[in-house]
Amino acid sequence: MTDMGVAGTDWSSAELDLIVADYFAMLKEEQAGQTIRKTEHRRALKAQIPRSDGSIEFKHQNISAVLTQLGLPRIRGYVPAWNFQGAIALAIGRYLEDQPDPVPMATRPLAGFGDMPALFVGPPPSSPPINAKAKRAFERVARKFDPALRDQMNRALGEAGEQLIYEREQELLISADRRDLARKVRWVSKEDGDGAGYDIRSYDPSGSERWIEVKTTRGGSTTPFYLTRNENEVARERPDAFRLYRLHDFSRQPGLFTLKPPLEAVLQLEALTFQASLK
Protein backbone atom coordinates (compact mmCIF):
# COMPACT_ATOMS: atom_id res chain seq x y z
CA MET A 1 0.00 0.00 0.00
CA THR A 2 1.35 3.39 -1.00
CA ASP A 3 0.77 6.11 1.57
CA MET A 4 -0.27 9.25 -0.27
CA GLY A 5 -1.12 12.63 1.19
CA VAL A 6 -4.00 14.88 0.14
CA ALA A 7 -1.93 16.07 -2.80
CA GLY A 8 -1.57 12.46 -4.04
CA THR A 9 2.21 12.44 -3.72
CA ASP A 10 4.62 10.31 -1.71
CA TRP A 11 6.01 11.80 1.47
CA SER A 12 9.26 13.69 1.01
CA SER A 13 12.35 13.09 3.16
CA ALA A 14 11.79 16.46 4.86
CA GLU A 15 8.19 15.55 5.72
CA LEU A 16 9.24 12.17 7.06
CA ASP A 17 11.95 13.74 9.20
CA LEU A 18 9.36 16.10 10.70
CA ILE A 19 6.84 13.39 11.55
CA VAL A 20 9.53 11.10 13.01
CA ALA A 21 10.73 13.92 15.29
CA ASP A 22 7.11 14.62 16.30
CA TYR A 23 6.53 10.92 17.07
CA PHE A 24 9.58 10.75 19.34
CA ALA A 25 8.49 13.95 21.10
CA MET A 26 5.16 12.28 21.92
CA LEU A 27 6.87 9.04 22.90
CA LYS A 28 9.09 10.85 25.39
CA GLU A 29 6.01 12.48 26.93
CA GLU A 30 4.29 9.11 27.28
CA GLN A 31 7.36 7.43 28.75
CA ALA A 32 7.58 10.27 31.28
CA GLY A 33 4.02 9.55 32.40
CA GLN A 34 2.50 12.59 30.71
CA THR A 35 -0.76 12.64 28.74
CA ILE A 36 -0.11 12.99 25.02
CA ARG A 37 -2.15 15.72 23.37
CA LYS A 38 -2.33 14.11 19.95
CA THR A 39 -4.65 16.74 18.48
CA GLU A 40 -2.24 19.54 19.35
CA HIS A 41 0.70 17.61 17.93
CA ARG A 42 -1.21 16.87 14.73
CA ARG A 43 -2.30 20.49 14.35
CA ALA A 44 1.28 21.71 14.73
CA LEU A 45 2.49 19.08 12.29
CA LYS A 46 -0.12 19.99 9.67
CA ALA A 47 1.10 23.58 9.80
CA GLN A 48 4.35 22.26 8.29
CA ILE A 49 3.10 19.24 6.33
CA PRO A 50 0.09 19.48 3.93
CA ARG A 51 -1.26 16.02 4.78
CA SER A 52 -4.64 14.72 5.91
CA ASP A 53 -5.35 13.54 9.44
CA GLY A 54 -5.71 9.98 8.17
CA SER A 55 -2.39 10.09 6.34
CA ILE A 56 -0.61 11.40 9.43
CA GLU A 57 -2.27 8.80 11.64
CA PHE A 58 -1.26 5.99 9.29
CA LYS A 59 2.32 7.23 9.12
CA HIS A 60 2.50 7.25 12.93
CA GLN A 61 1.41 3.61 12.83
CA ASN A 62 4.17 2.90 10.29
CA ILE A 63 6.69 4.43 12.69
CA SER A 64 5.37 2.18 15.47
CA ALA A 65 6.00 -0.85 13.27
CA VAL A 66 9.62 0.10 12.55
CA LEU A 67 10.34 0.90 16.20
CA THR A 68 8.84 -2.42 17.28
CA GLN A 69 11.23 -4.25 14.97
CA LEU A 70 14.14 -2.13 16.19
CA GLY A 71 13.38 -3.10 19.78
CA LEU A 72 12.46 0.42 20.86
CA PRO A 73 9.31 1.47 22.76
CA ARG A 74 6.35 2.73 20.75
CA ILE A 75 3.37 4.94 21.52
CA ARG A 76 0.60 2.76 22.91
CA GLY A 77 -2.19 4.35 20.89
CA TYR A 78 -0.49 3.83 17.54
CA VAL A 79 -0.83 0.15 16.68
CA PRO A 80 1.91 -0.98 14.23
CA ALA A 81 0.96 -0.85 10.54
CA TRP A 82 3.39 -3.24 8.87
CA ASN A 83 2.86 -2.21 5.25
CA PHE A 84 5.33 0.65 5.57
CA GLN A 85 7.64 2.00 2.89
CA GLY A 86 11.40 1.82 3.18
CA ALA A 87 11.67 5.61 3.27
CA ILE A 88 10.18 5.77 6.78
CA ALA A 89 12.75 3.27 8.07
CA LEU A 90 15.53 5.40 6.60
CA ALA A 91 14.05 8.55 8.21
CA ILE A 92 14.06 6.82 11.60
CA GLY A 93 17.67 5.85 10.93
CA ARG A 94 18.57 9.48 10.34
CA TYR A 95 16.93 10.45 13.63
CA LEU A 96 18.78 7.73 15.53
CA GLU A 97 22.13 8.87 14.17
CA ASP A 98 21.81 11.96 16.38
CA GLN A 99 19.99 10.20 19.24
CA PRO A 100 20.91 6.48 19.26
CA ASP A 101 19.02 5.89 22.51
CA PRO A 102 16.20 8.44 22.26
CA VAL A 103 14.07 7.05 25.09
CA PRO A 104 16.41 5.85 27.87
CA MET A 105 14.91 3.46 30.37
CA ALA A 106 15.93 3.49 34.02
CA THR A 107 15.77 0.02 35.55
CA ARG A 108 15.52 -0.65 39.27
CA PRO A 109 15.68 -3.81 41.34
CA LEU A 110 12.44 -5.32 42.56
CA ALA A 111 11.72 -4.99 46.26
CA GLY A 112 9.91 -8.34 46.40
CA PHE A 113 6.75 -10.08 45.22
CA GLY A 114 4.56 -7.07 45.94
CA ASP A 115 6.74 -4.91 43.70
CA MET A 116 6.40 -7.18 40.66
CA PRO A 117 4.70 -5.59 37.64
CA ALA A 118 1.72 -7.35 36.11
CA LEU A 119 2.99 -9.73 33.44
CA PHE A 120 0.95 -10.58 30.35
CA VAL A 121 1.67 -14.16 29.28
CA GLY A 122 0.77 -15.07 25.71
CA PRO A 123 1.73 -17.30 22.79
CA PRO A 124 4.79 -16.68 20.59
CA PRO A 125 4.07 -14.10 17.86
CA SER A 126 4.21 -14.70 14.13
CA SER A 127 6.64 -12.82 11.89
CA PRO A 128 5.31 -9.41 10.79
CA PRO A 129 4.36 -9.10 7.07
CA ILE A 130 6.99 -6.61 5.86
CA ASN A 131 7.26 -6.31 2.08
CA ALA A 132 10.61 -7.17 0.51
CA LYS A 133 11.58 -3.64 -0.59
CA ALA A 134 10.80 -2.11 2.81
CA LYS A 135 12.57 -5.00 4.54
CA ARG A 136 15.82 -4.23 2.69
CA ALA A 137 15.68 -0.58 3.81
CA PHE A 138 14.82 -1.61 7.37
CA GLU A 139 17.72 -4.07 7.50
CA ARG A 140 20.11 -1.25 6.54
CA VAL A 141 18.95 0.65 9.62
CA ALA A 142 18.87 -2.44 11.84
CA ARG A 143 22.47 -3.36 11.01
CA LYS A 144 23.60 0.06 12.20
CA PHE A 145 21.38 0.20 15.28
CA ASP A 146 21.42 -3.52 16.09
CA PRO A 147 18.50 -4.09 18.51
CA ALA A 148 19.63 -7.57 19.52
CA LEU A 149 23.17 -6.38 20.31
CA ARG A 150 21.87 -3.36 22.20
CA ASP A 151 19.72 -5.55 24.43
CA GLN A 152 22.56 -8.04 24.85
CA MET A 153 24.97 -5.32 26.01
CA ASN A 154 22.47 -3.66 28.37
CA ARG A 155 23.37 -5.49 31.57
CA ALA A 156 20.90 -3.49 33.68
CA LEU A 157 18.06 -4.48 31.36
CA GLY A 158 19.11 -8.14 31.34
CA GLU A 159 19.45 -8.28 35.11
CA ALA A 160 16.08 -6.61 35.65
CA GLY A 161 14.42 -9.18 33.39
CA GLU A 162 16.12 -12.09 35.11
CA GLN A 163 15.11 -10.80 38.53
CA LEU A 164 11.49 -10.51 37.42
CA ILE A 165 11.47 -14.16 36.31
CA TYR A 166 13.39 -15.31 39.40
CA GLU A 167 10.81 -13.68 41.68
CA ARG A 168 7.94 -14.95 39.55
CA GLU A 169 9.14 -18.57 39.61
CA GLN A 170 9.29 -18.50 43.39
CA GLU A 171 5.84 -16.94 43.62
CA LEU A 172 4.31 -19.53 41.25
CA LEU A 173 5.70 -22.41 43.30
CA ILE A 174 4.48 -20.87 46.54
CA SER A 175 1.03 -20.45 44.97
CA ALA A 176 1.15 -24.15 44.00
CA ASP A 177 1.85 -25.05 47.66
CA ARG A 178 5.45 -26.03 46.88
CA ARG A 179 7.40 -23.76 49.22
CA ASP A 180 10.03 -26.51 49.44
CA LEU A 181 10.76 -26.08 45.72
CA ALA A 182 10.48 -22.28 45.87
CA ARG A 183 13.35 -22.25 48.37
CA LYS A 184 15.50 -24.21 45.87
CA VAL A 185 15.07 -21.81 42.93
CA ARG A 186 18.50 -20.39 42.03
CA TRP A 187 19.53 -17.33 40.03
CA VAL A 188 22.40 -19.21 38.42
CA SER A 189 23.81 -16.44 36.20
CA LYS A 190 24.04 -14.08 39.19
CA GLU A 191 25.44 -16.61 41.66
CA ASP A 192 27.74 -18.60 39.36
CA GLY A 193 28.27 -16.47 36.25
CA ASP A 194 27.10 -16.90 32.68
CA GLY A 195 28.75 -20.22 31.81
CA ALA A 196 25.82 -22.55 32.58
CA GLY A 197 23.92 -21.80 29.37
CA TYR A 198 20.83 -20.65 31.26
CA ASP A 199 20.00 -18.02 33.88
CA ILE A 200 17.61 -19.54 36.43
CA ARG A 201 17.16 -23.06 37.74
CA SER A 202 13.56 -23.57 38.74
CA TYR A 203 11.02 -26.39 38.97
CA ASP A 204 7.51 -27.22 37.90
CA PRO A 205 5.10 -28.19 40.69
CA SER A 206 5.82 -31.90 40.11
CA GLY A 207 9.50 -31.34 40.93
CA SER A 208 10.93 -31.52 37.39
CA GLU A 209 13.78 -29.07 36.79
CA ARG A 210 13.39 -26.05 34.55
CA TRP A 211 16.53 -24.42 33.17
CA ILE A 212 15.35 -20.97 32.14
CA GLU A 213 17.22 -18.65 29.78
CA VAL A 214 15.75 -15.12 29.97
CA LYS A 215 15.91 -12.76 26.99
CA THR A 216 14.65 -9.24 27.72
CA THR A 217 13.87 -6.34 25.39
CA ARG A 218 12.27 -2.94 25.68
CA GLY A 219 10.86 -3.56 22.21
CA GLY A 220 7.95 -5.65 21.01
CA SER A 221 7.50 -9.39 20.93
CA THR A 222 9.02 -9.76 17.45
CA THR A 223 12.30 -7.96 18.30
CA PRO A 224 15.24 -10.26 17.38
CA PHE A 225 17.65 -11.46 20.07
CA TYR A 226 21.00 -13.21 20.41
CA LEU A 227 21.28 -16.87 21.37
CA THR A 228 24.77 -18.04 22.29
CA ARG A 229 26.27 -21.29 21.09
CA ASN A 230 26.40 -22.52 24.67
CA GLU A 231 22.71 -21.76 25.25
CA ASN A 232 21.73 -23.55 22.05
CA GLU A 233 23.82 -26.60 22.95
CA VAL A 234 22.25 -26.80 26.41
CA ALA A 235 18.82 -26.60 24.78
CA ARG A 236 19.73 -29.54 22.53
CA GLU A 237 21.27 -31.60 25.34
CA ARG A 238 18.43 -31.07 27.83
CA PRO A 239 15.25 -30.37 25.84
CA ASP A 240 13.20 -31.70 28.75
CA ALA A 241 14.52 -29.03 31.12
CA PHE A 242 15.50 -26.04 28.95
CA ARG A 243 13.02 -23.21 28.42
CA LEU A 244 13.59 -19.85 26.73
CA TYR A 245 11.59 -17.01 28.32
CA ARG A 246 11.18 -13.98 26.07
CA LEU A 247 10.30 -10.80 28.00
CA HIS A 248 9.18 -7.95 25.75
CA ASP A 249 7.80 -4.40 26.13
CA PHE A 250 9.79 -4.23 29.35
CA SER A 251 9.79 -0.43 29.56
CA ARG A 252 6.01 -0.27 30.08
CA GLN A 253 3.70 -3.33 30.43
CA PRO A 254 5.94 -6.44 30.28
CA GLY A 255 4.80 -9.41 28.24
CA LEU A 256 6.13 -12.96 28.20
CA PHE A 257 6.10 -15.93 25.90
CA THR A 258 8.06 -19.16 26.31
CA LEU A 259 9.79 -21.45 23.83
CA LYS A 260 10.95 -25.01 24.31
CA PRO A 261 13.37 -27.13 22.25
CA PRO A 262 13.90 -27.87 19.49
CA LEU A 263 14.49 -24.13 19.10
CA GLU A 264 15.20 -24.53 15.39
CA ALA A 265 11.54 -25.41 14.92
CA VAL A 266 10.38 -21.97 16.08
CA LEU A 267 13.40 -19.70 15.56
CA GLN A 268 15.37 -18.72 12.49
CA LEU A 269 18.98 -19.06 13.66
CA GLU A 270 21.65 -17.23 11.68
CA ALA A 271 25.41 -17.46 12.29
CA LEU A 272 26.78 -13.92 12.61
CA THR A 273 30.37 -14.44 13.80
CA PHE A 274 32.97 -17.18 13.70
CA GLN A 275 35.86 -17.97 16.02
CA ALA A 276 39.03 -17.94 13.91
CA SER A 277 42.42 -19.51 14.61
CA LEU A 278 45.45 -20.23 12.47
CA LYS A 279 45.67 -23.63 10.82
Image (cartoon, rainbow, N blue to C red):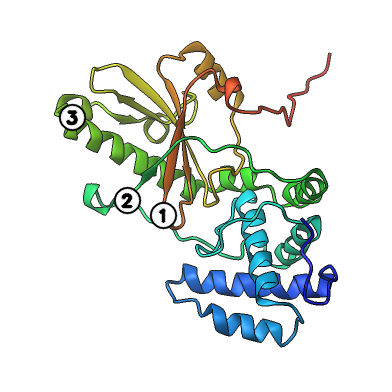
Pointer 1 residue: 253
Mark 2 to mark 1: distance in Å?
A: 7 Å
Residue 172 pos. (x, y %) = 24, 34
Give the amino acid at mark 3: Ala
Mark 1 or mark 3: name the one nearer the start of the chain. Answer: 3
In the depicted structure, whether residue 87 falls above or below residue 126: below
In the depicted structure, whether residue 273 falls above or below residue 38: above
Closer to the camera in the image, 70 or 132: 132
> Cβ–Cβ below 8 Å for labels 1 and 3?
no
Give the amino acid at mark 2: Ala
Pointer 2 residue: 118
Mark 3 or mark 2: name the one nearer the start of the chain. Answer: 2
> Cβ–Cβ below 8 Å for labels 3 and 2?
no
Q: Secondary structure at mark 3?
A: loop
Mark 1 to mark 3: distance in Å?
A: 25 Å
Pointer 3 residue: 176
Residue 278 pos. (x, y %) = 82, 18
Write the residue at 61% across / 59% down.
64
Residue 210 pos. (x, y %) = 36, 22
Give the amino acid at mark 1: Gln
In the depicted structure, whether residue 236 falls above or below residue 258: above
Closer to the camera in the image, 39 or 120: 39
Question: How many other residues sit within 10 Å of disc 3, few (<14), some (14-19) or many (≥20)?
Answer: some
Question: How many other residues sit within 10 Å of disc 1, few (<14), some (14-19) or many (≥20)?
Answer: few
Mark 3 to mark 2: distance in Å?
A: 19 Å
